[in-house]
Image (cartoon, coloured by chain):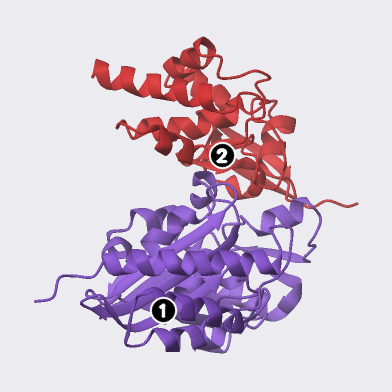
Amino acid sequence: MNEETSEIKLTVNGDLITKTVNVRQHLVDFLRLELGLTGSHLGCEHGICGACSVWVDGLVVRGCLMLAVQADGGDVTTIEGLTETGEIADLQKNFVDRNALQCGFCTPGMLMTLAELLRKSELSSREEIREHISGNYCRCTGYHAIVDAVETTISDRLGDS
Amino acid sequence: MDQVLMLLNEYGEDGQILAGGQSLMPTLNMRLSNPQLLIDINHLHELNSITLDDNIVRIGALARHSELALSPIIDMYLPLIADAIPHVAHIAVRNRGTFGGSVALADPAAELPACVLALGGTVVLQSVKGIRKVKADDYFLGLYETERKPNELLIEVQIPVQDPTGLWAFVELSQRKGDYAIAGLAFIGTSEKQFIKTAKLVYFGSEIKPTLAKKTMAILINTRWDDNTRKLIAETLGRDLDPMTNLQGSAKMKLHLQKVLTNRAIDLALKREKPSR
């Protein structure tokens, strides 16, 4: 099939990138296949599982429900970029300490989603934490340990400030 | 905008508007839809705003669900919608999905079409021929079927501000918070000393489109919310609704759930009655 392409300019994890992309390619396929950023996972590919969650212009979105061409001019952050900034190093440590992951497939999406909650820097109840990650499936942990890790992170941050 | 309208006019049903994409993109990923042309309208920033204009809240088609959640205008003047938004999918979807997209698609399980109908909103459509306004009562026609013609772009929804002394309630049941509604309703009404004066009930999730329960509404006019009224509406609701059987449950179960939710909605709404002067 003759595929139509388009040139896009965007920022990915702080780097300005110019690429010619297939107009039919969604954002996570672009990140994984063209840029080698394989931290964003593809689970269901129809917006249910949340494994592909990335940030576009500072907000968490489903990477599979957006075309790469739509990110033209945008600012994309993936788990690789967010990890590098150290913004969620404490959350990541608490995930490990509390065994909040087993297979780890959902973890990058989970962290991208939770980072948005943590940016609010206010106390969240367990109920609010659960609601915030209600769009991210985890098939290993039963969520309990994840909520524990988030709760610890929030209380540690508030305690320090 | 001119280019979008010209393309829509040229391609008609073969052209597909891409707004938030939270319903369209899954169908593309799964190869369930194959439009000849996708028209991305995300750069039409004139469709982003939420404004208050002479007691009418004007919600631009591209206002994202998370923007509605943070809007002081929605919070103050359309509390029904403020209550509905947390039920609209999950945070990552709300960050991208649009108000106009939800009303344009008219998914039977969607919250916002039901709110627009309950609040007596008006849908504003634009084509190369100009602008026309369609009342919500005339807009939702059937399963994913609306009054919007293939050459028209939904640009705005206009909703009169809620009566500050009035009642409202939004209730929904879904398997996981943010998942598709199995059953739900939007209630708008007025009351005096816990006596219901007027009531508007719009059901979604169970029906093929947002549905006004007219017979049940008639029973609720000028009535006391007591056991007798509860019994009466439980009997009547089955004549207003015609639930769909699908993966979410049988028609019989959904009718039962809608009865339960109706009780919850009116209980909740009456708690919001302002003390009389």
Q: Which residue is mark 1?
A: B228
- Looking at numbered disc 2 in the image, what kind of residue is underneath it? Leu
Q: Position of residue A87 (x, y in %)?
A: 42, 21
**How packed is label 1: few (under 14 Cα within 10 Å), some, or many (20 or more)?**
few
Q: Residues within 10 Å of mark 2 (few under 14, many from 20)?
A: many
Residue B267: percent from left, percent from top = 36, 66
Q: Quadrant of the C terminus of chain B?
A: bottom left
Q: Colour of chain A?
A: red
Q: Amino acid at mark 1?
A: Asn
Q: Please state the chain letter of the residue tagged with numbered disc 2 in the rendered image.
A: A
| Residue B45 visible here | no
Question: Mark 1 falls on what kind of element?
Answer: helix
Question: So how many labels did they put on this image?
Answer: 2
Residue located at (27% from left, 22% from top):
A158
Residue A8 picture quarter = top right
User: Do pointers 2 and 1 mark residues of a single chain?
Assistant: no
Q: Residue furthest front?
A: B228
Q: Is residue B201 above or below residue A146?
A: below
Q: Quadrant of residue B33?
A: bottom right
- Residues A74 and A17: in front is A74
Vertical order, B28 against B257 (above or below): above
Residue B86 % position (x, y): 44, 53
Q: Which residue is mark 2?
A: A10
Tell me if residue A145 comes above or below residue B268 in the rendering.
Answer: above
Q: Is residue B35 left or right of residue B8?
A: right
Can residue B274 be spotted in the picture? yes
Judged left or right of residue B23, residue B173 is left
Q: Is residue B221 left or right of residue B145?
A: left
Q: Position of residue B175 (x, y in %)?
A: 60, 50
Disc 1: which chain? B
Foreground tag (2 vs 1)? 1
